[in-house]
Image (spheres, rainbow, N blue to C red):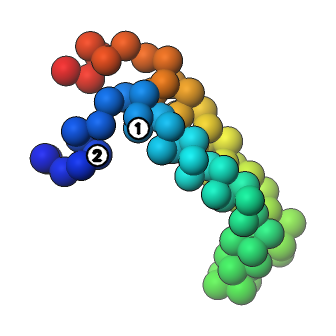
Amino acid sequence: MHGPWQQLSPASRGELLYSLAELFQTNRIELARMETRDVGKPLKISLGDIDGVVATLRYNAVLLIKCKAILFR
């Protein structure tokens, strides 16, 4: 694997994941509506799923931002 993601530092990866989490949070309702239309689950469940995605992205972003680069060599 030699793509652009691999060339990024762990902190840069974390910043990108955090930005992605913010995009999901900002568009939370529309994403949940799309999920509800796509699979037919209740909107409340879809909102919870989106919240879970946001939490997971933020968690992993913080891990990457705070970890030592040597762990990724």
Question: What percent of the width, then of the height, locates residue 68?
Answer: 37, 13
x, y percent for residue 61: 53, 34
Q: Secondary structure at mark 1?
A: helix
Name the one closer to the observer, 20 or 37: 20
The residue most toward the right is 44
Label ID, residue 53? none
Q: Is residue 46 left or right of residue 61?
A: right
Q: How many marks?
A: 2
**Mark 2, residues whose alpha carbon is within 10 Å: few (<14), some, or many (≥20)?**
few
- Up/down of 24 relative to 65, above or below: below
Q: Residue at x 47, y 35 (%)?
A: 14
- Name the quadrant containing residue 58: top right
- Residue 63 image point, x, y percent: 51, 24
Q: Which residue type does callout 1 highlight? A: Arg
**Does dot 2 land on a helix, a strand or a loop?**
helix
The residue that mark 1 highlights is: 13
Amino acid type at image mark 2: Trp
Q: Which residue is mark 2?
A: 5
